[in-house]
Amino acid sequence: MKKLATYVLIFLAACLTCAAQEGRAVYKMPKTGNFMRYLVEDGDTVYIAKIRPSYCVTKGKHGRNWREYYKLVHNFGKVYNYALEAGRLKHEIDSTYAASPMSVRMQEKYINAIQEDLLDKYEPILRQMTYSQGKLLIRLIDRETGVTPYDIIRDYKSSAAAAFWQGIAKLFEGDLKTHYDPQGKDFETEELIKIWNDGEYFTLYNSIFGKDPEIGVVPRYGKKELARQEKEAKKAAREAEKARKAEERAAKKAAREAQRAARKARQ
């Protein structure tokens, strides 16, 4: 089998060489098989391949800087999706405000509904976060929304609410007024965002920890919604079972009537 594979590769190389000598430029990938792209320029064949980057990180390195970097890489995957969702949600709220002007009362009702939904979805997730993950999330929210969490609460709720939650954050060594600093404190985080956007975060994480990362998943439904869906599913199951039993009884009744009719016919 190894010799056969070698002959096939030699045959393909010969075909490519002939194509180069004939001066035919080929750009497209074949429909089947695992072949490299190539380009013919001035009679020479130039092979084209996109090589994914490989991150070589020496495992077991000690020192405060390395430990902090490893923690940052780990925490980043845990919280970045939530910061992206915050940016998406803020854009949605601002678009809603712009599209349909609301009274103060309507805005309050709208924001309260969003707040209730967010608490229902994210409270279990936030309770499981570490202090360092919470602090990183605060800075990433500032990056993705353009405003700090403190300003978001103040603008969409009230200054009193913002001050209240700032006080809660302070109890846990946090600060909702923290700004994202891509040129300073958050330089390495900004590099991780570029790696994430290039689709290489899994590769980096695996090179450090030897396994795939645990990525924070944005919940589609909260506890209340899931409970409601579960209740409706159970109700539907009961109704389906009730209908099945009714059909079963009807079928048995029809069978008995058919038997009686048959007996009468024989008599």
Image (tube, helix red, strand yellow):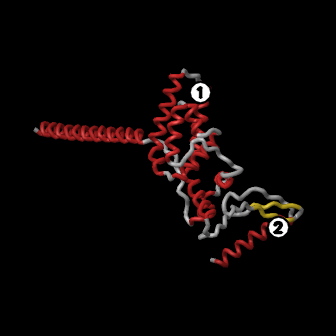
Q: Residue 29: which quarter of the image?
A: bottom right
The picture places residue 57, in percent across and down from the top left corner, at 64, 67
Q: Earlier in the sequence, mark 2 or mark 1?
A: 2
Residue extending farthest to the top is: 103
In percent of the image, x 44 and y 47: which residue is there? 124
Q: Is residue 56 above or below residue 87?
A: below
Instruction: Give the residue at mark 2.
Output: 18
Which residue: 81% across, 60% down? 39
Image height of 249 relative to 134, above or below: above
Residue at the bottom extreme, as displayed: 3
Residue 258, percent from left and from top: 19, 38
Mark 1 highlights which residue?
A: 97
Residue drawn at (30%, 37%), measured in percent from left and top?
A: 239
Quarter of the figure with the N terminus:
bottom right
Query: Which element is circle 2 on?
Result: helix
Indicate the quadrant where residue 95 lies: top right
Q: Nearer the viewer, residue 209 or 231?
A: 209
